[in-house]
Image: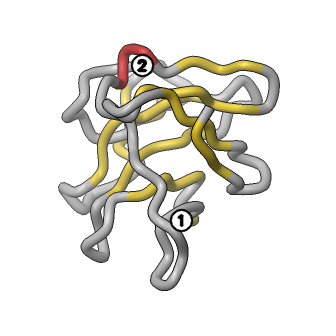
Amino acid sequence: MGEAQSEPRTLRTDGTPEAVTHDGQSDRPFPLPDGRLLWISGAGGRAGFILDGQRLTNHPGQPFVPVPAFPDRTRLEGERVIYDAGDGEWWINPTTGEAGRL
């Protein structure tokens, strides 16, 4: 999954890395089987999940969804990404943006 503080990157066709973001506030990339990239961004003041540049969680007025505290424990189970937020396991469905505590 990458280091906890690394900017999300993809690989170009020649195998060299290419930064997905340049805001200095994005990290914890998690590649999905279909080629999309899920990551965390603190841009806007509230850390939340981002999928291909679109915020999925923690919009103003929405309930807070914590982000992974231990990125190396993040895994895919079916359509859900399961992660450890430090206070227990949570899940997010990258397709729908739904999330909750396990």
Q: Which mark is residue 1?
A: 2
Task: Give the answer, above or below, for where 48 lies relative to 27.
Answer: below
Q: Which mark is residue 21?
A: none
- Tell me where residue 62 appears, x and y as whole percent: 54, 75
Task: Give the answer, above or below, for where 60 lies relative to 12.
Answer: below
Residue under the image location 58 percent in, 54 percent down: 52
- Tell me where residue 7 appears, x and y as whole percent: 28, 41
The residue carrying mark 1 is: 55
Amino acid type assigned to the residue bearing label 2 in the image:
Met
Residue under the image location 42 percent in, 19 percent down: 1
- Tell me where residue 50 appears, x and y as whole percent: 51, 55
Give SS at disc 2.
Answer: loop
Q: Place residue 21 in its image quadrant.
A: bottom left
Task: Give the answer, above or below, for where 49 lies relative to 56.
Answer: above
- What crowding class fits label 2: few (fewer than 14 Cα within 10 Å), some (14-19), or many (20 or more)? some
* For residue 15, side relative to residue 46 (left or right): right
Give SS at disc 1.
Answer: strand
Q: Place residue 96 in its image quadrant.
A: bottom right
* For residue 40, side relative to residue 6 (left or right): right
- What crowding class fits label 1: few (fewer than 14 Cα within 10 Å), some (14-19), or many (20 or more)? some
- Tell me where residue 59 appears, x and y as whole percent: 50, 76
Residue under the image location 35 percent in, 33 percent down: 87
Q: Place residue 3 in its image quadrant.
A: top left
Instruction: State how many labels appear.
Output: 2
Q: Quadrant of the C terminus?
A: top right
Amino acid type assigned to the residue bearing label 1 in the image:
Arg
Task: Give the answer, above or below, for where 86 lies relative to 21.
Answer: above
Residue under the image location 42 percent in, 15 percent down: 73
Looking at the picture, tell me which residue is in the foreground, 52 or 61.
61
Cα separation between marks 2 and 1:
20 Å
Disc 2 or 1, which lies upstream in sequence?
Answer: 2
